[in-house]
Image: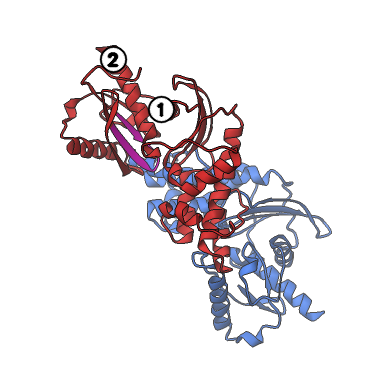
Chain colours: A red, B blue
Amino acid sequence: MSRSPDGVIVAGCDIGALTTKAVIMKDGALLGAEILNSRARGAESARRAMEGLLGRLGLQWDSISYCVGTGYGRNVVPFAQANVSEISCHGRGAHWLVPSVRTVIDGGGQDCKALLVDENGMLVDFRMNFKCAAGTGAALEVAAESLGIDVSELGPLSLQAAEPALLRKPCCILTQIEIRHHLFEGRNRADIAAGINEITALQILPLVRELDVEKDIAFTGGMAKNVGLLKCLERELGTEMVRFPEDPQLVGAIGAALFAADRARTRS
Amino acid sequence: MVIVENSRILAAETLPYRSFPDQAAVGAMEGALAKAGLRREDIALCLATGMGIRAVAFADDAVSEIISLHRAVRQLNSRARTVIDVGGHSFMAFNITEDGEIKESAVTDRCAAGTGMVLDAMAKVLEMPLDEMNTSAARSKKPVYINNQCPIFVESEVISLTNDGHDVLDLFAGVAASLAGKIAGLVGRVDLIPDVVMVGGVIRNSLVVSNLERKLGLGLTRLDGIDPQTVAAYGAALLAEERHRV
């Protein structure tokens, strides 16, 4: 159902709070993807991400017959014909990659969402946190900074922990102080990294538990790259989550491209 | 760090909490000793207070921040009935009874919204010293109000608004108003009985203070003769002095 008309090329562009993701699809298959840091310059990074991707694939701007924008900056994707909320896109993308998915936890740069999809990948219900940075990618970034490591190292490092350091503060800014105290007391960095993942999982889970969670469960967004956090969530949920054949950070953009394929089909 | 003798401040030192807390504590102690022309052995007793109590390795004991603040305020302003402390990471408010006892307190140690962190985030984004921003933004005719309270989200909202072409000082005026609104909400958890004394680093930001006074509908009293950031440390020093006498 997600195929665009034969030979037609569609695109999805997800401008998140921290990164911009662009994907291009053709005949129901992913041709390529690009991830850039966006921060404040959403429109500009969207253009750069898509331009880079087109160049790598040997395509032109006019090769794209339809593009859907999504994410925090979905309204400013300069080359998109339409935009769809990232909640719908994450559900759609996750379900397309692994059709058994019914529950999606999306850990983004500045928000966290839990959502349910039906057997067609369409949104049924969702919960969202956007008031507090705890339990979002931004929280992992500041925590990693306090630990003196890159956010990408948090997952692998945490797997070497003997016992997670106990972090109690619900606020990720105050957690920074707790992290410094643990470092001061000579606590092993791996233990602290594990502690960061533990508290982050505990901050995400209440959102998930508000929904009637159905298996399979998927974890998407940049936070899903953190294998330690993924394992914490799996332990708390008492089940394994699906593993994606693609980078989980691309799921929203893939969902957007699938919506673009729908539009291209309706139009032709 | 505050060193007192006969309840008088001999020296005070404030260090930012960027490095490890233990190093900051040692650095502040060394700085204060140097200012006072004293040596470590001259300190009869040291009490630690605040969030980083555990990091003050050289302290003889620790006292809670509210007890320290209460002690210092009682020393400096006997008419104080309400105390508001807005620091870099924390918020605290309490009432003092006619008899000088602590009554009704509200403490926020779970969330950085409504603390000086919001201003730090602004200074970082706008790349301008806080004092300078404060002075210039007071002239803003049309503050740009922001939606977020969490400092991390304030930072990205301000970045977006700056890129949308909003004036930096209008933004700062909006953030100051929003922070004052959040503080006013937290203050609502205690009784607002004059004199209302405000302490903590945020009081140095006159734009936040004037907004807060307007929202609370009364004037805030500052403590004379002390750096507003060192009030709790001064209280801890007074308590140390009392203990040493016993």
Q: In the rendered structure, which amino acid carries the disc numbered 2?
A: Arg
Relative to residue B186, is residue A174 drawn left or right?
A: left
Q: Nearer the viewer, residue A229 or B59?
A: A229
Q: Residue at x 37, y 55 (%)?
A: B127
Relative to residue A257, is residue A111 drawn left or right?
A: right
Residue A7, placed above or below residue B175: above
Which span is picked out in magenta? A12-23
Disc 2 designates what residue? A265
Which chain is home to disc 2? A
Tell me the quarter of the picture where residue B86 sits. Answer: bottom right
Q: Position of residue A193 (x, y in %)?
A: 51, 56
Residue A204, placed above or below residue A68: below
Disc 1 designates what residue? A89
- Residue B134 shows in the view: no
Q: Position of residue A224 (x, y in %)?
A: 45, 42
Precedes in sequence: disc 2 or disc 1: 1
Q: Nearer the viewer, residue B204 or A108?
A: A108
Which chain is home to disc 1? A
Q: Residue at x 54, y 54 (%)?
A: A194
Relative to residue A16, is residue A161 drawn left or right?
A: right
Mark 1 neighbour class, 10 Å CA radius: few under 14, some 14 to 19, many 20 or more: many
Mark 2 neighbour class, 10 Å CA radius: few under 14, some 14 to 19, many 20 or more: some
Q: Position of residue B150 (x, y in %)?
A: 52, 45
> SS of the residue at dot 2?
helix
Q: CA distance from mark 2 to mark 1?
A: 18 Å
Q: In the rendered structure, which amino acid carries the disc numbered 1?
A: Cys
